[in-house]
Image (cartoon, rainbow, N blue to C red):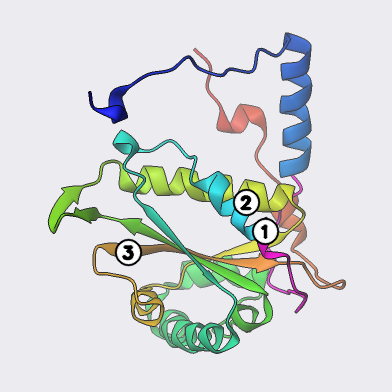
Amino acid sequence: MNMEFITKKLDFSNQTITEMKLNSKNFYKLVKKRRSVRDFKKQKIDFEIIKNAVLAAGTAPNGANLQPWHFVIIKNKSIKKKIRIAAEIEEAEFYEKKAPQEWLEALKPLGTDKNKSFLEEAPYLIAIFEKKYSVKNNKKVKNYYVKESVGIATGILISCLHYAGLSMLTHTPSPMNFLNQILKRPINEKPFVLLVVGKPKDDCEIPVYAEKKKTFSKITSIF
């Protein structure tokens, strides 16, 4: 018998309605405090926290349980410097040549530019790769719903890190192919996002407008 198709009874948490409402409300209260930050302390973070968050990400639902993701955790200073140099080359191209004026106007409240010093300052970077296909026994194996699966895993990773008391920035210079070269990832993997992780500086500030999230009625339809 193929072991992959043996089933077992679901271990399900049978919470009361009161518990469910309370837990959902508490999670919302916690996660709504998440903010993207760009000013990080050079403070060491226990690796176990990062490991647990990646393991949590690895539980994400995904197409045919093929788990089409790979996480590269970067703490080495010299590698972080290489990533910063490469990212700033792409960012300079973006800000000076590629970005339409409308996009630049939208970015103005954030005060961002081609300088990405946070890539060296934060104690950890996590490069998330989407696997377009896998290789088993020297054969290509197609992965399904890759972007959807990796996107969900990334959301779980961010939520877990936030729950653990860390701050992040989702950094997406375009293109990000330099990550394959620096991090020695194969051609079947494509960079999805570079997550910058650490504790914010004591004087870290965020735009006030970032706290203004759309209301339930604005983001929801009910039938």
167 or 143: which is nearer to us? 143
Distance of label 3 from label 1 (alpha carbons):
26 Å
Q: Position of 35 compared to 71: left or right?
A: right
Figure quadrant of the N terminus = top left
Residue 52 is marked as 2
- Residue under the image location 44 percent in, 48 percent down: 151
Classify mark 3: residues with Cα within 10 Å, few (<14), some (14-19) or many (20+): some
Whether residue 155 is visible here, answered yes or no, is no
Residue 33 at x, y percent in the picture: 76, 48
Vertical position of residue 22 compared to residue 152: above or below: above
Residue 48 has which mark? 1
Task: Write the residue at 29% across / 24% down.
Answer: 5
User: Are discs 1 and 2 less than 8 Å apart at CB?
Assistant: yes
Please tell me whether mark 1 sits on a helix, a strand or a loop: helix
Q: Main secondary structure of the magenta part?
A: loop
Please tell me whether residue 43 belongs to the stretch shown in magenta: yes
Residue type indicated by callout 1: Glu
For marks 3 and 1, give the one nearer the viewer. Answer: 1
Of mark 3 and mark 1, the one earlier in the sequence is 1
Rendered image: mark on residue 91:
none
Above or below: residue 157 compared with residue 73: above
Residue 219 at x, y percent in the picture: 57, 33
Identified at 26% across, 41% down, the residue is: 144
Q: Provide the residue span drawn in magenta.
A: 32-49
Residue neighbourhood size for the residue with mark 1, other residues' Cα within 10 Å, grouped as few (<14), some (14–19), many (≥20): few
User: Which disc, if any, is residue 190?
Assistant: 3
